Image (cartoon, rainbow, N blue to C red):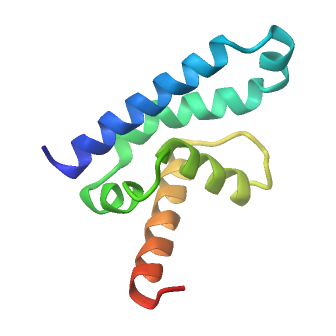
Amino acid sequence: MSKTQEMRNTIRECYRNYLSEWAKMPIEELVNKADEISLITKIAKILPDVITEESADHLCKYVDPINAVFEMLAYRNRYAYSSSVCEIEGAVQTIVIRERDYDRYGE
């Protein structure tokens, strides 16, 4: 199985975990987290289509690749929970670059 396919499987599993977690939340908490839930759902749907072998290789270092991309987007957008496919792809590339630099320079 390729790294890309493994990552797609990981993303599906992580998203199932989010759905399970959200199913246990009270309605008020779900409403308060609606923007965050919306972005996580969008990432989970888009991410499998934008990962490459290289990005899968770097994202596999994270237990939850959806959260890694979510945090990068949140940081880049100053916690405004909106994003486009291009922004999600950009967040993945930023993670790849940071991981590549860390692998190379250990920083």
User: For residue 72, what is the image quadrant?
Assistant: bottom right
List the single residue furthest toward the bottom: 105
Locate residue 82, reporting x and y percent. 70, 39
Q: Residue at x 81, y 9 (%)?
A: 27
Q: Residue furthest left?
A: 1
Question: Viewed as shown, does residue 16 lie left or right of 30?
Answer: left
Which quarter of the figure is the C terminus placed in? bottom right
Q: Which residue is at the front of the view, 61 or 8? A: 61
- Report the residue at 51% width, 25% height from top: 17
Q: Is 95 above or below relative to 9?
A: below
Which is nearer the eye, 106 or 5? 106
Residue 102 in the image, given as x and y percentages of width and height: 47, 80
How far across and how far down the image is residue 40, in percent?
60, 34
* In the image, residue 60 above or below residue 20: below
Q: At x 49% / y 28%, what residue is drawn?
A: 15
> Horizontal and vertical percent for residue 31?
82, 17
When asked about the image quadrant of residue 76, the answer is bottom right
* Drawn side of residue 28 relative to residue 101, left or right: right
On screen, residue 53 versus residue 10, left or right, reads left
Query: 48 and 60: which one is in front?
Result: 60
Quadrant assignment for the N terminus: top left
The quarter of the picture where residue 28 lies is top right
- Residue occupying the point 40% across, 36% down: 11
